[in-house]
């Protein structure tokens, strides 16, 4: 269990020794968006309480309770009014709370004042999410990206401990841990470290770009899974790829991206990519730090937006995902590139389950809503239909050509593999090779110049530049 014991949130040691490791989750509920301004939420209060507690439990904190605190406006000094600060303080003292999690962004001044008033460690939503990511990162790339986000976050506030440089536990020291030391903030050192991490991550960006370029040349379609955390992306990934990627019913179970080859019903294949889950109010520092990883989504041929359709806040969660994707320059309003996968239909009453497949339709706003496929990644319901829809959508963006290479052109055989995916190949007695190749539309012109005698199979419409 993560612990706050032995943690001095104050570098001068103001916090009482022997603080409890019990956590209290406090969720501000805005009464009026007009008075509260930015930060107001459309989310259901109970859903927010449940999610905030789930974030705390994601790193095995002992959540002693949750409190919804109505606020009409945020106070610059303490976020809450003095009466609420005192009321919460009484509960902290009675329940021997050592850690208070505020499900909202705190300024350094607000965090400091609340810690003094409550005599307990206080972290905000951003700090908690960074802590979770710090524990979950497994690869070198993931660790660097989370550390970059952490340092960017800490650069603007008091750095009380820098245990991520010598930690004996996961996370980044917001919650304390064995072997913790108190090192006074040094902005120059932090900036130097940020610059070093950015240089290391640049090699990741370059490598991923080369890998994507190679996949584009090969005609291998890439399908990316995105969605709110705990929507069931990893479970769906495992079901489609028959893989053993870690999947659990907890927030941010998957952090590091994974790619697997998946066979489609027609015998062709795709590359399926599982990515980190999103969450409301996702720290901008995390979005920026994980841009190299999330570019896999930006460059994907097709995006599967996985939604927990049984969740009471499914619409709000979908909007949060769309917001993050828009920050990456991805337009989710394009029905041709996005398929919504309504997962966990097994949790709905049978008479309330949506149709297995709902084609794209007008949304009444001058555009089309995406195709919707209802599935249960857990039971397998709807997965065959989902693969069929993926197959049809990929076919719209790729053409299959029949190529004959006589003996004098066999030297060009390797170029077929460079341009696209060779679906099948026949070697005749006279030495001629007959192959079927799937080519992405963006490679059509180059392919047509290299193999002018090849033509798309019957029933397909060739681009004007190729015909």
Image (cartoon, rainbow, N blue to C red):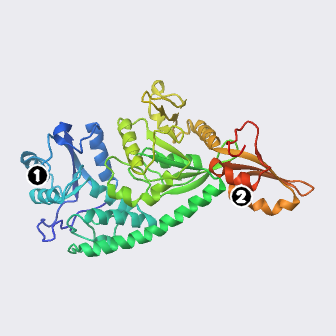
Which image quarter holds the N terminus? bottom left
C-alpha gap between disc 2 and disc 1: 67 Å
The spot of residue 403 in percent (x, y) is: 79, 50
The circle on residue 89 is 1
| Left or right of 232, for residue 240 | right
The spot of residue 51 in percent (x, y) is: 31, 45
Please tell me whether residue 268 is drawn above or below residue 148 in the rendered image. Answer: above
- Tell me which numbered mark, 2 or 1, is placed earlier along the sequence: 1
Residue 69 visible from this viewpoint = no
Question: Closest to the observer: 419 or 69?
Answer: 419
The label nearer to you, 2 versus 1, is: 2
Residue at far top of view: 351
Q: Residues within 10 Å of mark 1 (few under 14, many from 20)?
A: some
Question: Closest to the observer: 382 or 328?
Answer: 328
The spot of residue 464 in percent (x, y) is: 68, 42
| Left or right of 307, for residue 193 | left
**Tag 1's secondary structure?**
helix
Please tell me whether residue 66 is drawn above or below residue 1 in the rendered image. Answer: above
Tag 2–tag 1 contact (CB < 8 Å) = no
Res 23 quadrant in image: bottom left
Q: Residue at x 39, y 70 (%)?
A: 197
Question: Closest to the observer: 98 or 359?
Answer: 359
Question: Closest to the observer: 344 or 224?
Answer: 224
| Left or right of 369, for residue 11 | left
The circle on residue 417 is 2
Res 392 quadrant in image: top right
The circle on residue 30 is none
Q: Residues within 10 Å of mark 2 (few under 14, many from 20)?
A: some
Please tell me whether residue 359 is drawn above or below residue 401 in the rendered image. Answer: above
């Amino acid at each position: 269990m993560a612990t706050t014991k032995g943690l001095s949130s104050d570098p001068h040691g103001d916090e009482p020794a022997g603080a409890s490791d019990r956590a209290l989750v406090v969720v501000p509920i805005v009464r009026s968006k007009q008075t509260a301004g930015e930060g107001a939420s459309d989310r259901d209060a109970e859903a927010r309480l449940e999610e905030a507690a789930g974030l705390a439990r994601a790193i095995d904190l002992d959540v002693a309770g949750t409190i919804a605190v109505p606020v009409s406006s945020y106070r610059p000094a303490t976020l809450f009014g003095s009466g609420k600060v005192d009321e919460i303080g009484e509960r902290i003292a009675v329940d021997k709370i050592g850690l208070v999690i505020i499900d909202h962004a705190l300024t350094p001044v607000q965090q400091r004042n609340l810690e003094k008033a409550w005599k307990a460690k206080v972290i905000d939503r951003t700090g908690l999410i960074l802590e979770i990511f710090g524990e979950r990162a497994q690869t070198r790339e993931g660790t660097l990206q989370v550390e970059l986000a952490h340092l960017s976050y800490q650069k603007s506030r008091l750095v009380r401990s820098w245990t991520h440089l010598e930690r004996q536990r996961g996370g980044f020291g917001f919650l304390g841990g064995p072997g913790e030391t108190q090192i006074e903030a040094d902005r120059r050192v932090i900036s130097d470290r940020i610059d070093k991490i950015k240089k290391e991550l640049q090699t990741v960006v370059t490598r991923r770009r080369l890998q994507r370029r190679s996949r584009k040349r090969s005609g291998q379609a890439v399908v990316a899974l995105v969605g709110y955390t705990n929507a069931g992306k990893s479970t769906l990934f495992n079901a489609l790829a028959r893989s053993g990627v870690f999947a659990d019913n907890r927030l941010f179970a998957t952090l590091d991206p994974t790619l697997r080859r998946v066979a489609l019903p027609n015998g062709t294949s795709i590359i399926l990519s599982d990515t980190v889950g999103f969450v409301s109010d996702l720290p901008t520092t995390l979005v920026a730090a994980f841009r190299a990883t999330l570019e896999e989504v930006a460059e994907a041929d097709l995006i599967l937006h996985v939604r927990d359709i049984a969740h009471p806040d499914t619409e709000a969660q979908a909007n949060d995902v769309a917001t993050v994707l828009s920050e990456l320059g991805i337009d989710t309003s394009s029905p041709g590139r996005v398929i919504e996968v309504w997962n966990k239909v097994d949790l709905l009453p049978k008479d309330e389950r949506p149709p297995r497949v709902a084609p794209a339709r007008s949304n009444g706003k001058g555009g089309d809503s995406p195709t919707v496929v209802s599935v249960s990644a857990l039971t397998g319901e709807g997965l065959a239909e989902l693969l069929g829809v993926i197959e049809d959508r990929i076919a719209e963006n790729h053409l299959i050509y029949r190529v004959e290479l006589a003996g004098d052109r066999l030297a060009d055989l390797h170029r077929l593999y460079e341009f696209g995916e060779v679906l099948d190949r026949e070697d005749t007695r006279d030495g001629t090779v007959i192959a079927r190749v799937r080519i992405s539309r963006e490679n059509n012109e180059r392919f047509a110049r290299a193999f002018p005698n090849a033509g798309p199979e019957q029933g397909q419409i060739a681009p004007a530049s190729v015909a």
